[in-house]
Image: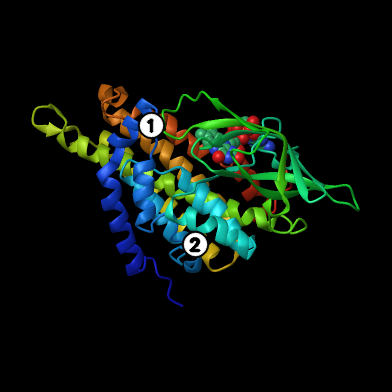
Amino acid sequence: MTINFTEPEERVALREAVSKLASKYGREFMEKQAREGGKMTEMWLEMGQNGFLGVNLPEEYGGGGGGMADLAAVLEETAASGAPLLMMVVSPAICGSIISRCGTEDQKAKWLPGIADGTLLMAFGITEADAGSNAHNITTTATRDGDEWVLKGNKTFISGVDEAQAVLIVARTEDAKTGKLKPALFVVPTDAPGFNRQPIEMAWRAPEKQFTLFIDEVRLPLDALVGDEDGGLWQLFAGLNPERIMGAAMSCGAARYAIDKTVEYAKTRSVWKDVPIGAHQGIQHPIAKVKIELEQARLLWQKAAALYDAGDDFTAGEYANMAKYAGGEVSCNAADVAVHTHGGNGLTVEYGLANMLVASRLGRIAPVSREMILNFVAMHTLGLPKSY
Ligand SMILES: Cc1cc2nc3c(=O)[nH]c(=O)nc-3n(C[C@H](O)[C@H](O)[C@H](O)COP(=O)(O)OP(=O)(O)OC[C@H]3O[C@@H](n4cnc5c(N)ncnc54)[C@H](O)[C@@H]3O)c2cc1C
């Protein structure tokens, strides 16, 4: 059997088209929006109009009929241009995947076309302050009251709620027989009575904001529930595996951006006679090292996406975790090398690299931290005892 390590022609063309569009905006646009309290909306809508935001979604609902590998390639290109679209991880990847795989025909018709063309943005909320990495401990509950669901609880660090029309909330319902709580997913409109948000002041300068959510007896129609109440965890992982693949691809794109800037600077900055600083091995080796780490991480997310697109959710989960780990590491390492190679300029606002130091840490922390991935690999891949 031949293993093909090159992307299909259509994906290469997709990357080129996205790169062309994203480069019109680039780092300067993103930094300006972040500084002035603006959003990425203009770029987001243009991406949507061109079909790039919904490449993974079914054609009958306005998508491109492709897969997660296509969507992740799109996000990697936006990040490599300097303008990563964080909300792509959430709206088309998590929410779009869950709704297209587990939603009813009505739910697909209601939500997917807007997600695909970017006119509708859906955020995703699972994290809670008192649960953190231990998602089994979430306490947001959904209780059936006649022909309504009543949601009660809180969420934290939820991205983009101010830009979203709805949030896909992970809550728990009570099993009538056992009394045990099981995860269930609900689409909550951001203007629903009782649904309140408070921005979290972050040190990371970005157009996308994070919020704490207070869900105070929010009443929802029965069709707010996406998937089967007894469907189990796979419905959640239909979205969480894409989230990890997208996180990895975004980190790889950011690392590509940082490496490109570093190489350019190392070739042109000269302080010893006429040789550029990049002529020295002390400068070259760290850049070469992160380039190798980058290619490793890219192979991992491409493998994870290929497995997901082939319907092998279980193995995709393993590789999506590994890819997310590798992506998080290379984005941190590449940002570090970029800042250091730029000397003092690396810490100026003008060069825009210092903010990448903060941004790159996101790849290590979210959506699942480096340590939780190591725990997963130790236990599931290597068969070691559960350590936590
Ligand atoms: C910018 C940003 C955007 C986000 N957007 C969203 C969003 O849109 N939706 C959403 O639901 N969530 C979002 N999150 C939340 C994110 O998924 C969580 O921050 C992440 O899951 C880690 O949880 P925590 O912050 O509570 O860390 P904690 O769980 O408190 O962990 C703290 C530290 O302890 C370590 N740790 C914890 N348990 C173990 C263990 N058993 N073994 C070893 N180490 C351990 C962790 O690795 C971490 O380093 C976002 C976070 C950030 C920073």
Crowding near pointer 2: few (<14 within 10 Å), some, many (20+)?
many
* Residue at position x 49%, y 58% in the image: 113
The C terminus, quarter of image:
top right
* Residue at position x 29%, y 41% in the image: 26
Question: Which labelled disc corresponds to residue 38?
Answer: 1
* Type of amino acid under label 2: Leu
- x and y percentages locating residue 127 in the rendered image: 64, 37
Residue 292 seen by the camera: no
Q: How many marks?
A: 2
Q: Is mark 2 within 8 Å of ligand 1?
A: no
- Residue found farthest to the left: 274
Residue ID for mark 2: 57
* Residue at position x 71%, y 30% in the image: 130
Task: Using the image, determine if residue 173 lies above or below residue 67.
Answer: above
Residue 335 seen by the camera: yes
Q: Is residue 24 left or right of residue 376?
A: left
- x and y percentages locating residue 117 in the rendered image: 43, 55
* Type of amino acid under label 1: Gly
- Residue found farthest to the bottom: 1
